[in-house]
Image (tube, rainbow, N blue to C red):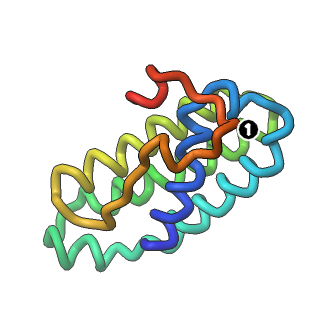
Amino acid sequence: MQGMAKNLEQLMPYVYSREEYNDPKNKAEIEKLIGNFAQGVKSVPKHAGENLLGKDPLIQYSINRLESNTHHAANSFNEGYVEFSRNILRETTAVCFTCHSTQNLGPQHNFAATTLPNAFRIYPSEQAD
């Protein structure tokens, strides 16, 4: 799951910046990042969640939802439905953060805007999201 967290850390700024996500010059990078994140999601071991939370059916449901959402986001992006893809990924990252922040588990990362390149376009309201 550490690989998935690293992929999310790289993808997330694009997901929360409408301009950067929709900029054609970022298309190849975003496609790669979505693909990397999707691969990370596929490698999430169900037993790791069960070790922490027990035999909760929510674990498999969450894994299935992450896989389905990232698949739909990648397909939508590739078909030109860029904003729809971005919204799917925003909802998907919310699932990650909801679970990890309420369960006090998983990696701790600083997703601060200070780590973004100076030329990266992200509005204060997007940073707050």
Crowdedness of circle 1 by 10 Å Cα count: few (<14), some, many (20+)?
many
Nearer to the camera, 6 or 118: 118
Residue at 54% of width from left, 67% of height from top? Answer: 40
Instruction: Judge from the rendering whether residue 18 lies leftward or rightward of residue 54; answer left or right.
Output: right
Residue at 17% of width from left, 50% of height from top? Answer: 102
Question: The N terminus appears in which quarter of the rendering?
Answer: bottom left
Nearer to the camera, 98 or 51: 98
Query: Where residue 16 sits in the image (x, y, percent)?
Result: 53, 33
- Count of numbered tags: 1
Instruction: Judge from the rendering whether residue 128 lies leftward or rightward of residue 100; answer left or right.
Output: right
Is 95 above or below relative to 86?
below
Question: The C terminus appears in which quarter of the rendering?
Answer: top left
Is 15 above or below relative to 102?
above
Residue at 53% of width from left, 45% of height from top? Answer: 12
Instruction: Report which residue position mark 1 lands on.
Output: 77
Residue at 56% of width from left, 42% of height from top? Answer: 13
Q: Quadrant of residue 36?
A: bottom right
**Residue type marked 1:** Phe
Query: Where residue 122 sits in the image (x, y, percent)?
Result: 58, 28
Query: Where residue 64 sits in the image (x, y, percent)?
Result: 44, 56
Query: Where residue 50 sits in the image (x, y, percent)?
Result: 22, 74
Instruction: Judge from the rendering whether residue 58 lies leftward or rightward of residue 27; answer left or right.
Output: left
Is 79 above or below relative to 50?
above
Which type of secondary structure does the marked residue at label 1 adopt? helix
